[in-house]
Amino acid sequence: MILKEKIAEQLPAWRERYKALAKEHAEVVVDKVTVGQVVGGMRDIKSLVTDISFVDPAEGIRFRGKSIPEVLKQLPKARGNKIPLVGGLYYLLMIGEVPTREQAMLVEAEWAARAEVPDHVYKMIRSMPKETHPMTLLSQAVLALQNDSAFAKGYHAGMKKDVYWEAALEDSLSLTAKLPVIAAFIYRFKYFGETKKPRYNAKLDYGANFSKMMGVADKKGYAELSRLYFILHSDHESGNVSAHTMHLVGSALSDPFLSYSAALNGLAGPLHGLANQECLGWLLDVYKMFKKVPSRDELYKFAWDTLNSGKVIPGYGHAVLRVPDPRYTAQMKFAKERFPQDDLVQLADLVFDVVPAVLKEQGKAKNPAPNVDAISGTLQYFYGVRDFDFYTVLFGVGRALGVTPNYVWARALGQPIERPKSLSTKMLEDIVKASQAA
Ligand code: CMX
């Protein structure tokens, strides 16, 4: 299998580098940690290692060193498409090289071979109460896949540590292959009452399959959007809640299914992945209130009313980024190239003009610029996917593409169980007193 061969080729050199850091340079100081960071969500503490992606506060995400525009330009595309194959992105994240079209297609074929979802997963979803949140269904479905985990089986059969990554890769391919099928089933089942299993067509790529299984009207347009969406949502370093959860749970040698189900539960939080359902809700509230795209002054007042009522403006701000998120920019470009006249796209554009100024005036948000969620729901809405609570499920399909390469490499490099140290409030106060006395 292409990914296995390529990782095996690279592994000895990576292991040497990693071992040297752990054994020979363990005492070198990386950073200092302040009280503000300890009580402030560990913001910016440099304590995770990943070579898959890096978020530059002034530039945004780079996947294996490549910016979003570079990724979208350089990764191979299927004939007649403008957005790259998702299989190419997975290859890039796993291997660190831009694949040929043929290599990307080999990854697509690995997915097609593993896309069948066991019956008990469908049964489990069908048996849940109708009002269950789709993220709950997705997370449960991933857990339900766990009994087939090659990693769990291998571990209990005495698998050697230096081949953990091979079983992790097998599970990662199986998980990422099944996620779009499960997501599409949840969509058709929850909102349309359909119970039949979606069928993955080995002749179509990941994006086209997802579009077909979702049953949207414009299959070609939605396939392009799906490719873009999954690529953009794949990875954002290791410190965000979903990626960090995957890393943390995986560090206990929980298999990729157990770890990703946990990650999805973090993604379901309103300050993380759930924000994309709230963003579109806010835009639609604006639109309903004015019954059209409002004037700048009207929008300015609406934004202030939101802040004055104690709410945040969803889709704006970021824990790390200090510029407009390039994932926002790429999606806005997609919308403007394809449906610039759409009222919600125009409204989202106006929000981009008005809201950063409002947030600056308010003076709280460190970054008044849009993040990935400020536009992603608008694009789904255009193609007829209008059940907001489903949007985080889409994020859940995409995020697996980034966190599973991290999982595979964490096992390949033998990363240890994570265990930061805790302090009591009194201990922190004593540290403050001692620093004041000094
Ligand atoms: N609207 C109103 N206030 C905002 C704001 C926004 N969009 N963004 C930040 N602020 C406020 C914070 O609530 C905080 O206020 P308090 O001091 O009263 O608690 C203050 O500005 C400072 O926050 P920050 O350091 O700039 O931002 P954080 O790192 O604490 O939080 C985020 C980042 C994304 C949670 C925050 O900007 C937010 O709530 N944005 C809206 C929700 C959203 O879009 N989430 C999607 C995140 C995307 C992702 O997960 O990838």
Image: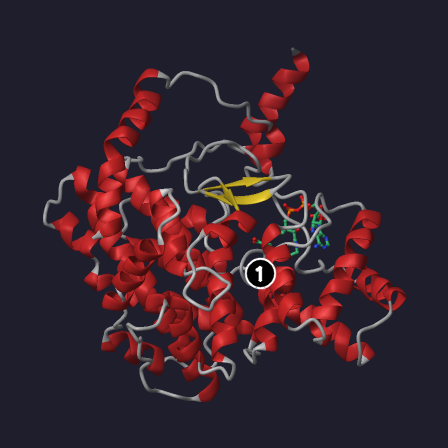
Seen in the image, is 307 located left or right of residue 41? right
In percent of width and height, residue 171 lies at 25, 56
Q: Amino acid at mark 1?
A: Pro
Point 74% across, 63% down: residue: 349
Quadrant (top left/top right/bottom left/bottom right) for the C terminus? top right
Residue at far front of view: 79
Asked whether mark 1 lies closer than 8 Å to ligand 1, one says yes
Seen in the image, is 111 located left or right of residue 315? left
Which residue is more in the foreground, 198 or 187? Answer: 198
In percent of width and height, residue 230 lies at 46, 61
In percent of width and height, residue 431 lies at 58, 22
Question: Picture quarter containing residue 104?
Answer: bottom left
Residue at far right of view: 297
Q: Is residue 273 visible?
A: yes
Question: Height in image: 63 above or below 286?
Answer: above
Question: Picture quarter containing residue 132?
Answer: bottom left
Which residue is more in the foreground, 253 or 14? Answer: 14
Q: Is residue 233 visible?
A: no
Question: Picture quarter containing residue 315?
Answer: bottom right
Question: Height in image: 257 above or below 340?
Answer: above
Q: Which residue in the protein does label 1 denote? A: 270
Point 59% across, 44% down: residue: 60
Point 67% across, 66% down: residue: 336
Which residue is more in the foreground, 350 or 139? Answer: 350
Provide the secondary structure element on which disc 1 rests: loop
